[in-house]
Every structure is written in C-alpha cells, then in structure tokens.
Amino acid sequence: MERMAFKLKMSAAIMLILCLIASPASAFADVVAVVSAKSSVTSLTLNQLTDIYLGRSARFPDGTPAIPCDLAENSPLREEFYTQLIGKSQAQIKAHWSKLIFTGRGQPPREVATEAGAKRLVAEKPNVICYIDRSQVDRNVTVLFPQ
Amino acid sequence: MRDDANEKILKHIDIFNSIRCAFIAAVIFSGATAPTACASDDGESPTFKLRGFGTLGGVHSNAKNADFTHGPFEPNGAGYTRSWAMGVDTKLGVQADARFSDKFSAVLQLVSKHQYNNSYEPSVEWANLKYQFTPDFDIRVGRTVTTPFMVSDSRLVGYANLWIRPPQEVYGLLPFINKDGVDVNYRFGVGEAMNMVHLSYGEISPKLPNSGTAKVKNSISLANTLDYGPITLRASYSRARVDLHTPETDALFEGLTQFGNTLSAIPGFASIGSQSLNLSNKYRFENALISFFSFSASYDRDQWLLMAELAHFNGYSFLAKSTAWYATAGYRIGKFTPYMTVAQLSPEKQSEAEIPVTALAVIPSLAAGAAALNDGINRTLTAGAFGQKSLAVGVRWDFMKNIAFKAQYDYMMLDSTSSGRLGNVQPNFQPGGKVSAVGIALDFIF
C-alpha cells in the first residue's frame, strides 16, 4: 500500500517535471494570444505568433492582415507574454525593434494602456491580435495560442 | 569633375527638400502632435516620429605606430594617436519617420560619428521615400544602407547588437554600404518559415581620410533571409564598379606611367618601358569590378544568442581577394549577457614580377627609379592584403530601460606581413605581432 502511494507520488512528480521541461509556456503562463471571435483565424503555431510579434509577418496564416498590439511597457502581462511565449526579455524586444526602426524596416506594435482596452480593441477589430490573461477569455475572443 | 560634384549636391538638396516638405506636411496633417497613443491609430492616419540612438564609448589600445579604429573611414583612433580614443565607438543618430498613409512613408536619419576629416559633422545615413505596395512588398527610393552582412544596416545602433562593434574581420570587407538608389523588399511564407528577398541598386561616393576618394557605381546587392522561429539563415551577393584613389597609390601609378614613357623613348629600353606601363594599367583602381558573397546563420531564443558569418571578397588590384568568418556566442544571465567572438580574415597574398633593375644598371638614375617603383608595388600589394585573427570577450549589461553598458576586450593576432584591421598605419609600423584593445560603451535609444 505504502509502496503504491510512493509509486503514485513518484509518477506524479515525474509527470510534473516532464510538464515543466516539455512545455514551460503552458505550465506557467496564464497569458494567451487572442483575436476577435469574428476572425476566421482559430489557431496559431508558436512560430507564427513569434513572426507576427517580431514584425516578420503582417499576415495570419490564411493571408488576412494581422495587426499586433502590446500592453503598456510596465505591464506584468506584457513581460510574461514575451519571456514565456516569445522567449525574449523586454530589453531583447527593445533591441530587436531598435534594429527594425533604425533601418526603416518596421514599427513596433501599437500600445494599449490596459488589458480591458486590449480586449475591447480585439473584439472590435478582426485583424487585431493581442494577449490577455486566460481568466479574461470570454465568447467575444478566440484563443490562438497556447491552445 | 566640379560639375559632377555640383550635380551630386543638387541631387541631395532635392532629396532633402522633398523629404522636408513631406515632413512638414506630415506634421500639419497630424496636428503637430506626436501620436504616441496608438489605440486610435489604424495605420491609416499620418504620423510623425522622432527617435534616436547613440553610443558613448572609449577604447584603449596598445597598438604601436598604428591605431585601432572603427574602419577605413576613421582617420585616427587608439594606439599611436592617443591612449584612449572616444571616436572609435561614440556616435549619435537621430531619425525622423513620417507616414503619410498606410502605403507611403519617409525616413531621414542623420548620424554624427568620427569621420574621415577628423570631425563629427553629421552625415545622412538614411534618406528615402518608401511605398508599401502590400504588407509584404515595398520599394524605397533615396539613400538606403545595403545588407551584405547580417547586421550591416544596424551596425551603428549599438543598442540593437550584442557586441560594442561588429567583428571587423568580416564587416571591414565591405565598408561602402550606403547607397543612393532604389531597393526592393519582398517577403513570403515558406511553410512555417518567413523568407525575405532584398534587392538594391545604386551608387555612392564616400570620402576617405588623407584625401582618399572612392566612387562606387552600378552597385547591386541581393540578399535572402529565412527566419524560422529562433533560427535565421541568410545569403547575400553584391557587386559594383569601383574607383579608388589614395595619394600614395595615385603617386605610384603615376610614377609607373612616367617611368614607362621615359623608358619607351630610349632605344633598347622599350620593352622594360612597356612593362612599367602595363603594371600601371594593371593595378590602377578605375572602374574595377569587385564582388562579394556571404552566408550567415543565427540562433536567438531564451538564454542563447549564437551568430556566425562567412564571407568572401573578390577584390581587385591592391585590395586582395579575402575570406573572413566569425562566430559569436552569448549567454544571457538575467540582465547580463557575457559573450565571446572568434574571427579570422585571410587574404590571398599577391606578388608581382619586378621591373628588371640590373638591365638598367648602365643608367644609375633609372635603376634607382626602378628599384623605388618595385618597392612601391610590393609594399602596396602587401599592405592591401589585410590579415588577422582575433578573440573577443565581453559583457552586455541591460542595467536600465533603453540603456545598455558594455565592456569588451579584443585580442588581435596580425598576419606577419600585415597591419590587419588597424588604421592610420605609420611608415615605421612593424607588420604582424599582437595587439589588444579594451573598450567600454554606453548604448542608448530614445
């Protein structure tokens, strides 16, 4: 009986560790990338999301225009989105955009002051993609990543 | 010659005027306010933004009878001229971006850095009008910076890069990268990867220290960049017709021509005379075709930043064919990113059959002249074959918003017959040897 419990505990621990190793994003992050429920886009891969947020692509996979939006610079959710999903710190993101701005290749995403504002913008405009806390997801928005 | 220069100036004034008008229009359209709140910005209303970047840096080098510089455009640096030099890395750039509609925009970037005439006079780095046909296809007309290397167009934006300055073994191969002309960018998806094609055409006439001049004509560059998640792969090809003049090489070629003409007129010496004339024609840097290709790769995600580039320069005359590469690895630990770079520049050494001095021994003044010209040719060919290896270690510290502090140590092993990438080389410079440089820099954006 005791051995059984130990085995269970062990396998639970191993599962947890595997989860942490395999997908740190989904294990920690409550932040999700969303579009309007009216959008034809229903999911993105991590690479596609990264391309849109780093200015490499201005389209969703189906070819419709994609306009990314950012929360304000001091927002913890913004920090979480970039470190956990995109794999870059705020300083790295700044360095990345300064590379594009000062070579005339692009402008960083528009900024929205609050999460509520971001959600409203997404709901209104089918081309806009933003990130919000998973707890804020409702029927007006579709979660693109992580699913 | 003067008319040509005037025409150039007029052309620049034209560009300035059109951009100035465009900016004024943009300011009026946007109600003279900087639109920083973007929630209402649909990408359709005109906007105007003023931003900048800069580096405050100092370098110390133990180079003897030569200077550690940022490249062939810098007249002096650290080592021979002074122990600590601010000019190698210090610079300030200001950029105005104007967007008139979702398709039409303009950019003007002025950069002040230590330049050929020992001043910090601002120069135009970027000045172009861009038309964005689709989100994936644009054409720019005016001055742009081409991208023979991975970060050549952002090489001055210290904040955007990990190092204090790009590895000079590779980036020094093609220092003429501004261009007045046209460039086209087109990108498309390939499965989960994004592919960007960049094509440019144009010309530029940069000035060099010590009255040197260069004229780059019919310059064509093609680059292809593939981004797949954190991986970037890149290939580029460039070619151009180049005139290159320095007082020393002009004097040498002029000397060969005069010597050849003199000898040709003397019975019995005509063949030596034509040999001298041939040498002058062979090495004269006029309308010379040079070409260049490179391959690069990088990986950038989470803690790791890895970069490597390999480049081959198909030179002409005294600028030797050269191959160069570097590899950089950086590892992020919180706000600190220690990094290391190894780099190598290998020229194909050239030599030339000498004008026969002994055949001229009967006329000692001619023999002495031939000996001096032989010496000049060999010195020039040797000096144009730059070679060095280096190891650099450094750290970037993102200690506060929009500002990074960097410290970097470079250890260079110069090729035994070369001054490597050192500049302001003095006549009594001893080729070869080892040189080190220590640099600190504050990189910022605003």
Image (cartoon, coloured by chain):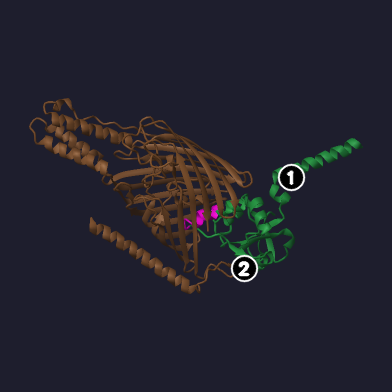
Chain colours: A green, B brown
Figure quadrant of residue B318: top left
Ranked by sequence position, the earlier of labels 2 and 1 is: 1
Q: Of all residues shown, which one is farthest toward the right?
A: A1
* Image quarter (top left, top right, bottom left or bottom right) of the N terminus of chain B: bottom left
Q: Residue at x 23, y 59 (%)?
A: B3
Q: Main secondary structure of the magenta part?
A: helix
State how far apart marks 2 and 1 are (Cα).
Answer: 35 Å
Who's the residue at 56% across and 69% down the image?
B41
x%, y% of residue B83?
43, 41
Per the rendering, the mark at residue B325 is none
**Closest to the observer, B429 or B384:** B429
Amino acid found under the numbered disc labelled 2: Lys
Secondary structure, mark 2, is loop
Q: Which residue is mark 2?
A: A125
When the figure is inspected, residue B146 is found, relative to residue B107, above or below; the finding is: above
Q: Quadrant of residue A7?
A: top right
Question: Mark 2 vs mark 1: same chain?
Answer: yes
Say which mark, if any, is on residue A19. 1
Tell me what residue is drawn at x 70 percent, y 44 percent. A22
| Residue B116 visible to the viewer | yes
- The percent position of residue B214, horizontal first and vertical second, equals 31, 48
Q: What is the span of residues highlighted in magenta in the rendered image? A: A95-104
The question of residue B110 being in magenta is answered with no
Query: On the rendered structure, is B424 left or right of B257?
Result: right
Give the chain letter at badge 2: A
Q: Secondary structure at mark 1?
A: helix
Position of residue B179 measured from the top left corner of the image (x, y, whole percent): 37, 54
What kind of residue is marked 1? Cys
Quadrant location of residue B181? bottom left
Q: Mark 2, residues whose alpha carbon is within 10 Å: few (<14), some, or many (≥20)?
A: some
